[in-house]
Image (tube, grey):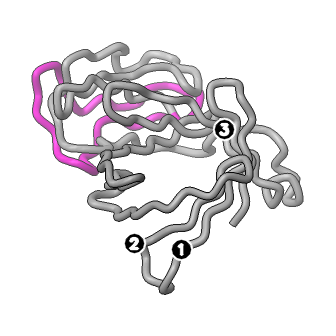
């Protein structure tokens, strides 16, 4: 599969091909024409263990209204996937989620900050909460514009991966 990625404002051509037909495992990756051998396994929803050049890294991928945010080590990268198939389907720009949206915890952790209150109007991509996991703080953002109908957590509360945090209507 070939993708064009905009990573922090730079365009990269990325080709991915797995081997053996199994999910995860050995991957052939070509970045801007340069071959890179990698192993990858999904260890939790949206969390991957990636080995490149003998060095293991945990990577967490978080969908946001403008694309995805990739968290690795102590850095995060804003990535917009420019997949030609999306253009063919008439979805040329980043789209907001539609309808009532449930916001869930992408990983287990502790709520360290609540940035909005129930009943407030929020914009797509606006920060709602900050979850601390593995000594990293991760902002959970609104998948769409609307009203924060329910806020189901409070600061200092521990949450599990997939736990419902808020509802936006």
In the image, which disc is placed on residue 80?
3
Q: Determine the residue positioned at 55% across, 56% down.
A: 36
Q: How many circles with numbers are drawn on the protein?
A: 3
Judge the density around disc 1: few (<14), some (14-19), many (≥20) Cα neighbours within 10 Å: some
Judge the density around disc 2: few (<14), some (14-19), many (≥20) Cα neighbours within 10 Å: some
- In the rendered image, residue 117, in percent from the top left (x then y), is placed at 34, 16
Where, by quadrant of the figure, is residue 7 drawn? top right
- Relative placement, left or right, of 118 versus 32 is left
Where, by quadrant of the figure, is residue 42 drawn? bottom left
Disc number lying in front (1 or 3):
1
The CA distance from mark 2 to mark 3 is: 25 Å
- Relative placement, left or right, of 3 versus 128 is right
Residue indicated by mark 2: 25
Residue indicated by mark 1: 18
Which tag, 2 or 3, sits closer to the chain's start? 2
The CA distance from mark 1 to mark 2 is: 7 Å
Q: Quadrant of the N terminus?
A: bottom right
Foreground: 24 or 103? 24
Q: Which residues are magenta?
A: 143-169
Q: Determine the residue positioned at 67% across, 52% down.
A: 34
- Relative placement, left or right, of 32 versus 61 is right
Label 2 close to label 3 by CB (< 8 Å)? no
Which tag, 1 or 3, sits closer to the chain's start? 1
- As helix, strand or loop, the secondary structure at mark 2 comes to strand
- In the rendered image, residue 41, in percent from the top left (x then y), is placed at 35, 64
In the image, which disc is placed on residue 28?
none
């Amino acid at each position: 599969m070939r993708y064009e990625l905009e990573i922090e404002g730079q365009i990269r051509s990325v080709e991915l091909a797995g081997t053996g037909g199994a999910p995860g495992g050995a991957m052939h990756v070509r970045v801007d024409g340069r071959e890179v051998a990698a192993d990858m396994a999904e260890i939790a929803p949206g969390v991957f263990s990636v080995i490149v050049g003998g060095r293991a890294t945990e990577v967490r991928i978080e969908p946001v209204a403008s694309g995805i945010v990739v968290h690795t080590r102590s850095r995060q990268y804003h990535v917009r996937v420019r997949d030609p198939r999306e253009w063919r389907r008439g979805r040329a720009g980043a789209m907001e989620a539609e309808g009532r949206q449930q916001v869930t915890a992408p990983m287990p952790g502790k709520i360290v900050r609540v940035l909005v209150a129930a009943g407030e109007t929020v914009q797509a991509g606006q920060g709602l909460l900050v979850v601390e996991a593995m000594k990293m703080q991760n902002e959970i953002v609104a998948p769409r514009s609307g009203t924060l109908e329910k806020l189901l957590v409070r600061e200092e509360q521990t949450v599990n991966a997939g736990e419902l945090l808020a509802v936006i209507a």
